[in-house]
């Protein structure tokens, strides 16, 4: 089965820009993998941020953006806020089934 | 506003079947073209997609769970369900249901233990 890989952890200071990535063991991620991104705070259900690579939900803050970068799906936070500290998961459609990445713990210091 | 609520036993014995239901409000499943998903998260670990069901009743399952999983839809009661057979301690997790991948229910913890 496909393995989806994310950075285990990232640390960023408030106001900085950070990019989280999502790679597939089968090769380059394309729009056909329909990348999704989710934010999960402790004790809460995940909340969808991005779908189909670039599209934001109505509640997604403008500082979040999705893209494809160097063969991976990417989530960029421009001007990180303290409340962005959370776990972030990507989700890819791989060979007919959906696969989550292992998650990135984003720390804002 | 679409809302989902998981329900079912919080404790299941090893080798038995885990059965959960997801009640949907705010939309009629029978009139919605979405698919309906189950996802789980073991304590302290990441998310795992279990599978999904279409309004038509068609399904798609995680290959690693496919032999043990059945997801069904009940349009008359506006809900869908998950059955996972032959459970072990490794199936202990918070189980979430979702409309496609948003919104999600609040999740329900199922512990597999004798």
Image (cartoon, rainbow, N blue to C red):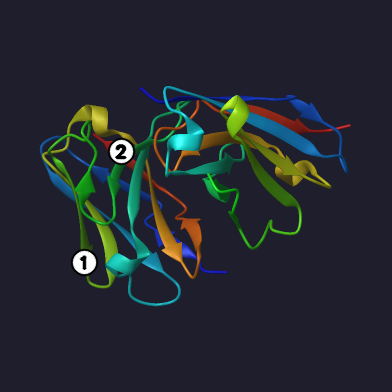
State the residue at coordinates (33%, 70%). Answer: A29
Give the structural element (helix, strand or loop) at label 1. Answer: strand
**Residue position marked by numbered label 1 in the rendering:** A69
Q: In this view, does A27 lie above or below A78?
A: below
Say which label, 1 or 2, has the lower sequence index. Answer: 1
Foreground residue among B30 and A7: B30
Q: In this view, does B78 lie above or below A32?
A: above
Quadrant where the C terminus of chain B is found in the figure? top right
**Residue position marked by numbered label 2 in the rendering:** A107
State the residue at coordinates (55%, 50%). Answer: B49
x, y (%) of residue B61? 61, 56
Q: Label 1 is found on which chain of the structure?
A: A
CA gap, disc 1 and disc 2: 22 Å
Quadrant where the N terminus of chain B is found in the figure? top left
* Mark 1 residue crowding within 10 angstroms, few (<14) / some (14–19) / many (20+): some
Left or right of B89, for residue A102: left
Quadrant for residue A4, please give it: bottom left
x, y (%) of residue A35? 33, 57
State the residue at coordinates (27%, 72%). Answer: A71
Quadrant for residue A52, please give it: bottom left
Q: Label 2 is found on which chain of the structure?
A: A
x, y (%) of residue B12? 81, 31
Circle on res. B50 = none
Give the structural element (helix, strand or loop) at label 2. Answer: strand
* Mark 2 residue crowding within 10 angstroms, few (<14) / some (14–19) / many (20+): some
For the image, the number of numbered tags is 2
x, y (%) of residue B73? 62, 39
């Amino acid at each position: 089965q496909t393995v989806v890989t994310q950075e285990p952890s990232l640390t960023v200071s408030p106001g900085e820009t950070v990019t989280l990535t999502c790679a597939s063991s089968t090769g380059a991620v394309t729009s056909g993998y329909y990348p999704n991104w989710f934010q999960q705070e402790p004790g809460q259900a995940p909340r969808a941020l991005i779908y189909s690579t670039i599209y934001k939900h109505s509640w997604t803050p403008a500082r979040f953006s999705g893209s494809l970068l160097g063969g991976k799906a990417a989530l960029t936070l421009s001007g990180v806020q303290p409340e962005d500290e959370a776990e972030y998961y990507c989700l890819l459609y791989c060979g007919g089934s959906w696969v989550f990445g292992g998650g990135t713990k984003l720390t804002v210091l | 506003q679409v809302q989902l609520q998981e329900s079912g036993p919080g404790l299941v014995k090893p080798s038995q079947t885990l059965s959960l239901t997801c009640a949907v409000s705010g939309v009629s499943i029978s009139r919605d073209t979405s698919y309906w998903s189950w996802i789980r998260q073991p304590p302290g670990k990441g998310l795992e997609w279990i599978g999904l069901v279409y309004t038509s009743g068609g399904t798609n399952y995680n290959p690693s769970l496919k032999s043990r999983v059945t997801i069904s839809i009940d349009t008359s009661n506006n809900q869908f369900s998950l059955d996972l057979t032959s459970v072990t301690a490794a199936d202990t997790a918070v189980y979430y249901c979702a409309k496609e991948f948003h919104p999600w229910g609040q999740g329900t913890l199922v512990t597999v233990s004798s």
